[in-house]
Amino acid sequence: MSTQTNEVAPYARPRRNLKMWGAIGLSLGIVGPSLAMSGNGQGTAAAVGKAVPLIFLLGAIGIALIAHGFFRLTQRFNQAGSAYALVGSTVGPRAGFFSGYGIMVTYVLFAIACLGAVGSFVNAFLANVQSSSLHPFQIPWVYSGAGAFLIAGYLVTREFKNVVRILLVIETIGVISMTILIIVIFAKGGAAHGGGFNFSTFNPKGTSFTTIMGAVVAAFLSWAGFEACASLGEETDNPAKNIPKALLGCVLGTSVLFILVMFAQTIGFGTTAAGIKAFSTSGNSIATLGHTYVGLWFSLVLSFTAVMSAFACFLGSAGTSGRLLYAFSRDGLGPRQWAELDEKRNQPVKALVAVFGLIAVVDYISFVTGHPNVGTGNDALNSYFYFATVGAMTLMVSYLMVEVGTMVHLVRDRREIIYEIIFPVLGAAMIIAVFYFNVKGQTNWIAEPFLAGAIMLVGLIITLGFPGLASKVGIGLSRNLREPESREFPASSGHGQSPFPTPEV
């Protein structure tokens, strides 16, 4: 990483050719509702029993607190760097780089994880098709992942507005399918294994506070990526209005959906010990319930939507990480080639190629070695859960920095709504609590929280160890956020302070 001069790479500004629904499409693609609801409840059920809906209710509250910060900051600052720009323009350039680094690493980890999810769900779909066979035909997960990798590699270098349309269509189909399943389960009263329509699922009785807070990370993982649309700040029409609306729409919509789906799944399997065991050991909980309550054909539909959701998550994560690498590089924090936009496609193709290359190497090593192993008995799911959890924890570090940036922004520029500072304070407290209870009691030094901490430590060393980094980030942010196309953003509240800090040297 070169940081010896204050020059920043010249670049062509992306075209603003996305509407609000395009921004929502990217966030939904990375959140992956069908993927999250098919695979994120099992571990939670194993940890907290029937209290799964409670965990997701707490997760929704936490995400709402975090989303408030992104909502307020994107009303003023919009740039391809997402948290890189939001924190850099409020706390300072070094903090901005550290936050952006965390977001970029997170999306790379999510992309790595999602190829494992694709492989696992493809095999689950094949097993569902051959439900009468004791030994159904299966495909080594790296082959399914390679297919998704190649298709996504082609799509992500095309006009990005077409990509976000694909993401939006995929997730809309998944949401409609899950909604139908919810209605059927509620209509039949649930309880495949006993327990009935049971609101005790929102009661923490019998579950320790430590266990509850430790399980909340799985809920956070389900929403991880909701802020991805912030990386489209330079490609979305009227971003000061449309990006915050996209954030709000994504968080509110998925919060209601996730709580309802997890409640339906818990009572669908049943709140008895047998029901909880069936839930926690299901390879694809949504598809299993689809088969139980509707029939094989509906289970196949849900299995296929899970495959497509995992693919959409990979496509969105890889595409967003490439854009973040592009944002860094054009500010002189990476090779100039990564700061170039392809003239024909208007995409940072070289930055995307670099990201895709790293993803391919890590996934191939994971497949060949059979590591990491988190004990699911399925190598593809092991890869998914491990890298996704590490990514969720690096993302929470960036979320914490955004909460700090929101506090600074409210105190400095938005004193008329200073009372809102309670939201980032509570959000930061919840993030710190989740970290503490996930690290507490860990003895394995390659456990997810420790690897996430090591990755962020590398970012911190880079942040503090390169004297020219702060000035480069400051110059880049000042240029990118002050250009004429950015003047549609709301003005300062008039307290005489510029929203663009003087670069630290």
Image (spheres, grey):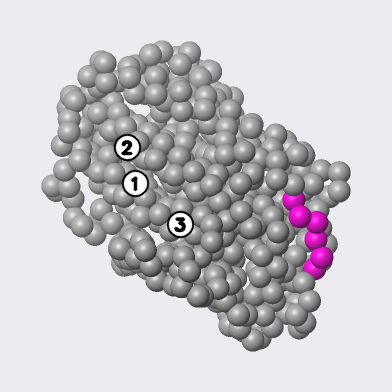
Q: Is residue 227 visible?
A: yes
Q: Mark 3 falls on what kind of element?
A: helix
Q: Is tag 1's residue or tag 2's residue first in the polypeptide sequence?
A: 1
Q: Which residue is mark 2?
A: 259
Structural distance between the alpha carbons of marks 1 and 2: 8 Å
Q: Mark 1 falls on what kind of element?
A: helix
Q: Which residues are magenta?
A: 9-14
Q: Which residue is mark 1?
A: 60
Q: Residue 291, located in which quarter of the rendered image?
A: top left
Kind of residue sitting beneath label 1: Ala
Give the number of the disc on residue 72.
3
Q: Is residue 339 left or right of residue 299?
A: right
Structural distance between the alpha carbons of marks 1 and 3: 18 Å
Q: Is residue 120 left or right of residue 414?
A: right
Of the pair 382 and 254, the residue shown nearer to us: 254
Q: Is tag 1's residue or tag 3's residue first in the polypeptide sequence?
A: 1
Q: Is tag 3's residue or tag 2's residue first in the polypeptide sequence?
A: 3
